[in-house]
Image (cartoon, rainbow, N blue to C red):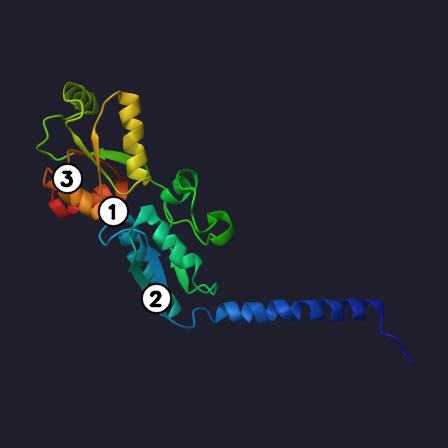
Amino acid sequence: MKLPHRRQILHMAAATVALPAMSRVASALDYPTRPVRIVVGFPPGGGQDILARLVGQQLSERLGQPFIVENKPGAATNLAIESVVNAAPDGHSLIVIGPPAAINATLYKDLRFNFLRDIAPVASFVRQPYVMVVNPSFSAKSISEFIDYAKANQGKLNMAGNGQGGGPHMAGELFKIMAGVDMITVHYRGDAPALTDLMGSQVQVYFSSVQAAAELIKAAKL
């Protein structure tokens, strides 16, 4: 019997190893096979919600399946994350993640998931700073004027937060420490309701993402 040449053996071995990989690639190319949900841990109208809807529309057009945004606010996005952790691990349940996911790991001792273990990153959408936002009718027109006003009215200003441990909340608390001022934190379930009350002067300041602030200015025509 004529034995195969060494090079032939290597080629056959390589082909054998490649078969499972080829099947995985073919499976990935079929994705998605049904509608995909994109979970957002905040109410409609906020920065993450707007981003998810823009990205979802592009993905729907490109991949031929609906990408449906599901708003699941509460517990500083923990409810939303937990719902995706408990979903089938088949790529048809996605979630938009922001700073609260990292903050919550240090604030909550009873989380029913391990973020680093249970959530796999797919893509980075945006990086943006926070800005201080006040109603145009507010008397302070600069940061220094705001600090002076807050110091003269300790404990009398309302600062909006988007949930315990959320990015705007943490940014606001850091500002209070650095500026040496005391403000009452009023928590909302997301950017949209916080900014709505800011426009109505129920709260005096909000530390908003640049994107959410831009949407506020556009909507209010400020």
Please name which of the two marks, 3 or 2, marks the residue nearer to the observer. Answer: 3
Q: Amino acid at mark 3?
A: Leu
| Distance of label 1 from label 2 (alpha carbons) | 25 Å
Q: Nearer the viewer, residue 172 or 2?
A: 172
| Distance of label 3 from label 1 (alpha carbons) | 13 Å
Residue 164: where, in percent of width, then height? 30, 40
- Quarter containing the N terminus: bottom right
Callout 1 touching callout 2 (CB < 8 Å): no
Direction from residue 210 to residue 22 in the image, left or right: right
Q: Which residue is mark 1?
A: 190
Q: Is residue 173 visible?
A: yes
Q: Which mark is residue 198?
A: 3
Residue lying farthest bottom? 1
Across the whole image, how many numbered discs are drawn on residues? 3
Residue 26's image quarter? bottom right
Callout 3 touching callout 1 (CB < 8 Å): no
Q: Amino acid at mark 1?
A: Gly
Q: Is residue 68 above or below residue 222?
A: below
Looking at marks 1 and 2 on the same chain, the residue that comes earlier in the sequence is marked by: 2
Residue 100: where, in percent of width, then height? 36, 43
Q: Amino acid at mark 2?
A: Ser
Q: Residues within 10 Å of mark 3 (few under 14, many from 20)?
A: many
Local secondary structure at mark 3: helix
| Distance of label 3 from label 2 (alpha carbons) | 34 Å
Residue 68's image quarter? bottom left
Which residue is depicted at the point 35% across and 59% down? 38
Residue 202: where, in percent of width, then height? 12, 38
Q: Which residue is mark 2?
A: 60
Q: Residues within 10 Å of mark 1 (few under 14, many from 20)?
A: many
Which residue is depicted at the point 43% across and 38% down? 106
Residue 83: where, in percent of width, then height? 38, 58
Local secondary structure at mark 2: helix
